[in-house]
Image: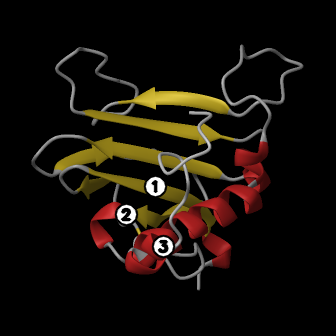
């Protein structure tokens, strides 16, 4: 931190060597800029009638049952905008060394698309329009990986 020397200088040659990681992070940055839900100044705030912050609902592998214990290897949460036009995301983190099956929320009139799956390197990021639709009400998340789902209007499916 705060050092103007080799310790903190960015070596752009490594971006070429790690092109798939560089591309993935570039997609993440572009998605964050394009998704109204992720453009909020405050993601975590107290919910009030006047608050326009997205709502965060915490889960574990079972909906509504986060495991906050020190031995937990998984966490999931839903980011729910004030309206569907802001976007709805469901993020699942599996820090376990085996795949885990997570329950996913049901949103009437919408389906989930898997837009990020870090097990699919180097093609981890998919645009919602072409991303794979999740069938059923659960999904298996690979070992030590993250999967992000995006809600898509069923009437707009490609």
Q: Residue farthest to the left?
A: 98
Of the 4 image quadrants, the one containing the N terminus is top right
Q: Is residue 106 left or right of residue 84?
A: left
Coloration mode: secondary structure
Q: Nearer the viewer, residue 48 or 39?
A: 39
Task: Locate residue 59, reporting x and y percent.
Answer: 39, 30
Q: Secondary structure at mark 2?
A: strand
Can residue 116 be seen?
A: yes
Q: Are marks 3 and 2 in contact (CB under 8 Å)?
A: no
Q: Is residue 65 left or right of residue 46?
A: left
- Marks 3, 1: nearer the viewer: 3
The label shown at residue 44 is none
Q: Nearer the viewer, residue 130 or 84?
A: 130
The earlier-in-sequence mark between 3 and 2 is 3
The earlier-in-sequence mark between 3 and 1 is 3
Q: Which residue is mark 2?
A: 117
The label shown at residue 148 is 1
The label shown at residue 15 is 3
Q: Residue farthest to the bottom?
A: 158
Q: Secondary structure at mark 3?
A: helix
Mark-to-mark CA distance, 3 and 2: 21 Å
* Other-residue count near label 3 (Cα within 10 Å), few / some / many at <14 / 14–19 / ≥20: few
Q: Are marks 1 and 2 in contact (CB under 8 Å)?
A: yes
Q: Secondary structure at mark 1?
A: strand
Q: Quadrant of residue 74 in the image?
A: top left
């Amino acid at each position: 931190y705060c050092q103007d020397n080799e310790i903190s200088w960015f070596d752009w040659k490594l971006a070429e060597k790690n092109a798939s990681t560089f591309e993935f992070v570039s997609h993440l940055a572009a998605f964050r800029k394009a998704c109204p839900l992720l453009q909020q100044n405050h993601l975590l705030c107290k919910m009030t009638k006047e608050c326009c912050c997205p709502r965060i609902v915490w889960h574990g592998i079972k909906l509504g049952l986060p495991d906050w214990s020190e031995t937990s290897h998984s966490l999931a949460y839903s980011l729910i905008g004030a309206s569907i036009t802001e976007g709805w995301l469901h993020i699942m983190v599996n820090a376990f060394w085996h795949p885990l099956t997570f329950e996913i929320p049901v949103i009437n009139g919408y389906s989930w698309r898997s837009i990020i799956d870090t097990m699919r390197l180097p093609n981890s990021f998919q645009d919602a329009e072409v991303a794979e639709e999740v069938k059923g009400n659960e999904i298996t998340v690979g070992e030590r990986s993250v999967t992000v789902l995006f809600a898509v209007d069923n009437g707009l499916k490609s």
